[in-house]
Image (cartoon, rainbow, N blue to C red):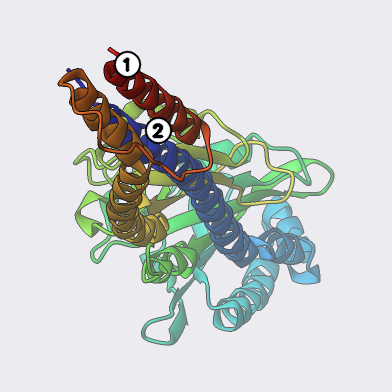
Amino acid sequence: MKSIRSRIERTLIAAALIPIALIALYVYLSTHQTLTNSGIESSNRQVELLASSVEGTLAHVPGDLFYLRDSNSMHHYGRALVINDAKAKEEYGRSIARDFLSIAKNRRIYNQIRFIGADGKELIRVEHNEKEGSSRILQSELLQDKSQSIHFNNTAKLNFGDYYISPIDLNREAGEIEKPIRPTIRFATPIFAVGERFVGEIILNVDADAFLSMVRNANNTKGLSFALSDVDGYLMENQNPALNWGSSLNLAHGGNLKQLISANVVQQITESQNFTTLESDDKLITARPLFASTGQQQPMGYLVAFAEKSTVLKLLDHFLIAFAIFFGLAVITAVIIARVLSSTMTAPLIYLTQAADRLSKGDMNAEIQINSGDEIQSLAEAFERLRESVKLLMKLG
């Protein structure tokens, strides 16, 4: 049979610990949510800052393209192409080459600036190597036929004032990927002369490493890593270089965001045109589409940030340790207090039980007295009157 004392102890311990556990659970859940939201906000800020820097690298490219298109030299060169004026083509071709060379040297992000004729053959080409700090105008014997280039053919279909932006890929020369690899994004616009006669194109080959390096360097951020993928999810930059450029048009090894996160998450990222914030089992994921030009509808890729939950929620580890210590102390304290209180509460009952047992055995001499000031004292007084009454009756008998 369970004693009243044990039941009182359990009740007092439960009354003390249940509120503590409920409060701790609330604090844990609210802290978890607060830290998660804080981690997401921090990732969003970092992604937006990095995305703005990447897009800012390309912000002036359309302006450079139109500046070269609208130059006086280009106007005369286009006319010379139409009337086949060899002298004018040579004179204004040299002037255009100097303009190309000047922009390549000063902007420092263009690997190549080219004028391609209406037949797809390069007529003017300037190359710049930022790592070597060198620029040069190519001789005519080094110029190539680009008539089969998708970039040339897509640009040739445009109207005056429009411009083409290529996907980011690895540059090819004579049909082969350059070694070392040279990530490139191209901006191109058609050139018209003597009315609406198409005479060629200006194509600016932008060194994509100018902004890929920003993503690469940002991976040194503690607790946060970044990846840049193309519109199909193929990686162009991430912490594992072996996964970069895995599409069939590049190195064809298949390196994709799906090797970093689940296919379902990748699908949600590539279908979004805005910020996307998601959670996996161990990561907080923030993604944002990147656009090569203001007003462009089709993104050139997706910037994805990964925050390890273990880092974001690190404060919870300290909370759990502190709570475990606090809860252990609370248990010990509750047990001690419960035993003291239960002992205080049940001692009079035990005393009365023992007194009643003595009465039942005929011991009428031991006085029953309790000074608790409560109902138990009233019960003790009633027992005492009963003892006196029984004692008196025994004498009379």
Name the residue at 27% across, 54% down.
332
* Residue 89, placed above or below residue 185: below
Q: Which residue, given by chain and number where applicable, does mark 1 sit on?
A: 396
Residue 137: x %, y % from top left: 48, 77
Distance from disc 2 to disc 1, alpha carbons, whole Å, reads: 101 Å
* Kind of residue indicated by mark 1: Leu
Q: Nearer the viewer, residue 373 or 274?
A: 373
Residue 184: x %, y % from top left: 44, 57
Tag 1 or tag 2, which sits nearer the N-term? 2
> Is label 2 in a helix, a strand or a loop?
helix
Circle 2 residues within 10 Å: few <14, some 14–19, many ≥20:
some
* Residue 56, placed above or below residue 27: below
Name the residue at 31% across, 40% down.
347
* Kind of residue indicated by mark 2: Val
Name the residue at 40% across, 71% down.
217
Q: Residue furthest front?
A: 396
* Residue 363, placed above or below residue 304: above
Q: Is residue 30 left or right of residue 284?
A: right
Q: Which residue, given by chain and number where applicable, does mark 2 sit on?
A: 266
Q: Select label 2 or label 1 by which is in front.
A: 1
> Is label 1 in a helix, a strand or a loop?
helix
